[in-house]
Image (cartoon, rainbow, N blue to C red):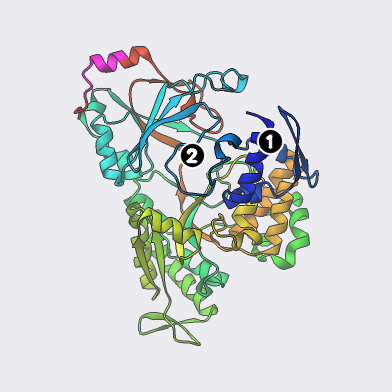
Amino acid sequence: ITADDVLFSFQTLKAKGSPFYRFYYANVAKAEKLGERQVKFTFGSGENRELPLIMGQMPVLSLNYWRDREFDATTLEPPVGSGPYRIERFEPGRFVVYRRDGNYWGKDLPINRGLYNFERVRYDYYRDVTVALEAFKAGAYDLRVENVAKQWVTGYDFPALARGLVKKETFPNQMPSGMQGFVFNLRRPLFQDPKVRQALAYAFDFEWSNRNLFHGQYVRTRSYFDNSELAARGLPSPEELAVLEPLRKELPPEVFTTEYQPPVANDDAQLRANFQKALQLLRDAGWIFRDRKLVNAKTGEPFRFELLIDDPTWERIGLPFARNLERLGIEMSVRTVDSAQYENRVRDFDFDMVVNVWGQSLSPGNEQREFWSSAAADQPGSRNLAGLKNPAIDRLVDQVIAAPDRASLVTRTRALDRALQWNFLVIPHFHIPYTRIALWDKFGYPSVTPLQGVQLNAWWIDPDKDAALAGRGRTSGER
């Protein structure tokens, strides 16, 4: 890896890479080569304390490899990388096999000791979640992260688990849960009124879904930074008010007066009350009930929209939501498309509503610009799926990025969290503070789970367990 590779990577990712990189590197004023092993990045201001670390995380591409190739062209030729593994072989849409690079330049760095222990790692791809689970039970692969609550509770009742050949483990994490939810596209006139967005949230019955679909495994998400000290709780603290007060005229008044809580429906009475609140908000926004349909009071247009998904699993929560909306006179269709069509439509913001997850770290920073900034709203491929354009939130994002210390970062992130909550960009879903993993019992892993949760690159094959597993008769047909 040379300085020329680093400069090429910076310039190429910023010009031709994902929009993510343009937002990430926006504060880099200049990059220059000082020697074969030295590059100097000059920052536009000294406020972004995270930026030196961000530049240290930059993927390094090979200038020599890409010199005669188009970076943004579609290809199936494995590129030259700089990581601990190389692509050994693959079949598009079926699998990819990585082989450990014995000459990996960073293998002896202290930060990498104990990592990357597998000689080969193979990822298999399945179009259907049920087929994928059955393949695991048949011994076709060794480990799976289970994201479906029903599968975790009911899908692993097979002899290999009873015999102890397969284990189900949960690994806690202390990272922010992020935000998963139904995302409104504010570019659509239908969703530009926050009263409308707030009203529709009353129709999502999390409590019913958790009881009937998820076996009570989930916790309702209320913050963009749940499961961490960054989440806004209670009313704003004096420190938060100092951040929010200059923006009071541009923020919803509830930011200052009310703790955000998603609607709760523990019984039918609460659900009926939620529907009444929703109808009142919709009336206030100019919608009326006519012939059992909700229509615009001025134009007579019915209230209808589409939930776009690429995984039939989402139908399990989308269809009950649609039935509740129907009680409000709203027609929501659920449309499932293939992953390629979904990606294209989401990239171009061609949707009414989608399900999305914004992951968060314990150190939020530059990525918040791509999530929430006005500039990102019109950038195809950005993560600002909601199309949010709010000068106050732009300034809050800038303040998060410029936080001079941890205490300030926590305060400013909580202030941002409140502003996002009361803009009703999403109908929050749910989360769990751990990772569910099913595995054939051949692995060793650290006894202590790190702060950020399970790290599979720190696992290894335990020779004794592997031999015992083979000795106890695991075969490709084991069920």
> Height in image: 68 above or below 451?
below
Q: What residue type is labelled 1?
A: Leu
**On the rendered structure, is 248 left or right of 426?**
right
Start and end of the magenta stretch?
A: 467-475
Q: Nearer the viewer, mark 1 or mark 2?
A: 1
Residue 472 belongs to magenta span: yes
How would you rate the neighbour count of disc 2 (Cα within 10 Å): few for under 14, some for 14-19, many for 20 or more?
some
- Residue 261 in picture, x, y percent from top left: 55, 57
> Height in image: 391 above or below 364?
below
- Mark 1 vs 2, N-terminal side: 1
Q: Classify mark 1: helix, strand or loop.
A: helix
Q: Would you say the residues marked 1 and 2 are in contact, meaning their CB atoms lie under 8 Å apart?
A: no
Task: Give the alpha-carbon distance from disc 1 to disc 2, as whole Å.
Answer: 27 Å
Where's the C terminus, which quadrant? top left
Q: Residue at x 33, y 61 (%)?
A: 319
Q: Classify mark 2: helix, strand or loop.
A: loop
Label at residue 479? none
The count of marks equals: 2
> Height in image: 302 above or below 203?
below
- Name the residue nearer the viewer: 146 or 122: 122
How would you rate the neighbour count of disc 1 (Cα within 10 Å): few for under 14, some for 14-19, many for 20 or more?
few
Quadrant of the rendered image containing residue 91: top left
Quadrant of the rendered image containing residue 384: bottom right
- Residue 347 in picture, x, y percent from top left: 50, 58
Residue 442 belongs to magenta span: no
Asked if residue 154 can be seen in this view, the reply is no
Q: Residue at x 43, y 70 (%)?
A: 275
Q: Residue at x 67, y 48 (%)?
A: 413
- Name the residue nearer the viewer: 351 or 205: 351
Residue topped by disc 2: 433
Label at residue 53? 1
